[in-house]
Amino acid sequence: MRIIGGKYRGKKLISPVSDKVRPTSDKAREALFNILRSRMGNDFGKLALIDVFAGSGAFGVEAVSQGFASVALVDIEPKDLLKNVALLPNEKNKINVIKADATQKLHLNEKFDVLFMDAPYHQNLSEKALEQLRDVLKTNALCLIEVCNDEVCNLPEGYKLIDERKYGIAKVLIAEFIC
């Protein structure tokens, strides 16, 4: 596992110890950042990203490397992601690690332009979390929701499906939060 682009391109990340953590593949992360660029432009410098069920933190650390202004990493057990955050000590002011259950309401002072969510597969957690994230997303926030490719994820009211992509066993729903 490595950072695939930006300031820290090529930097190796620490793979999770727990088999419960399943990082998004390098190939899928690269494709998703290309999607972000095509929809939001090349300059991420004013954008805030929230990575929910952050696991290893690879997606959020990648976002910092690629120039996001701020990143919130939310996970119920942040032990693995803290190791990867520590690899970027010069960026600690851009990264907020939040130990929380994403299926419960988050009380944050920031609203986010981009959501990345990679909940444990086949546990129906994505829909629950999307309901709870309404208060932390900006209107028109771009949402990347990773699920297993055989999993059905019904987006709650207020989310509009734009596209769907498959990467190996993963399927990513690309949606817009319309409130």
Image (tube, grey):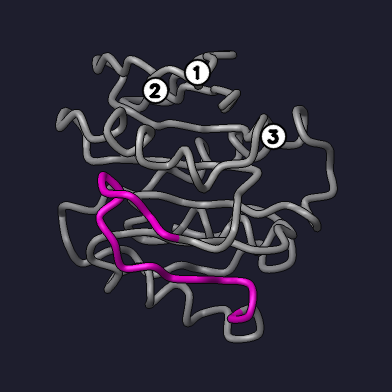
Q: Residues within 10 Å of mark 1 (few under 14, many from 20)?
A: some
Q: Is mark 3 on a helix, strand or loop?
A: helix
- Disc 2, disc 1: CB below 8 Å? yes
Q: Is mark 2 on a helix, strand or loop?
A: strand
The residue under label 1 is 165
Q: Residue at x 30, y 28 (%)?
A: 127
Q: Residue at x 69, y 35 (%)?
A: 36
Q: Does the magenta stretch include residue 98?
A: yes
Q: Which of 135 and 59 is in front in this view?
A: 135
Q: What stretch is highlighted in magenta?
A: 92-107
Distance from the alpha carbon under mark 1 to that under mark 3: 12 Å
Most frequent secondary structure within the magenta stretch: loop
Q: Tag count in the figure?
A: 3
Q: Where is residue 68 in the image (x, y as percent from the top left)?
A: 70, 58
Q: Which residue is drawn at 60% across and 51% down?
A: 111
Q: Position of residue 80 (x, y in %)?
A: 30, 69
The residue under label 3 is 34
Q: Which residue is drawn at 52% across and 14% down?
A: 161
Figure quadrant of the N terminus: bottom left
Location of residue 145 (image quadrant): top left
Q: Residues within 10 Å of mark 2 (few under 14, many from 20)?
A: many
Indicate the amino acid at tag 1.
Arg
Q: What element carries label 1?
A: strand
Q: How crowded is mark 3: few (under 14 residues within 10 Å), some or many (20 or more)?
A: some
Q: Where is residue 3 in the image (x, y as percent from the top left)?
A: 57, 59
Pick whichever of labels 3 and 2 is earlier in the sequence: 3
Q: Please give the label number shown on residue 171.
A: 2
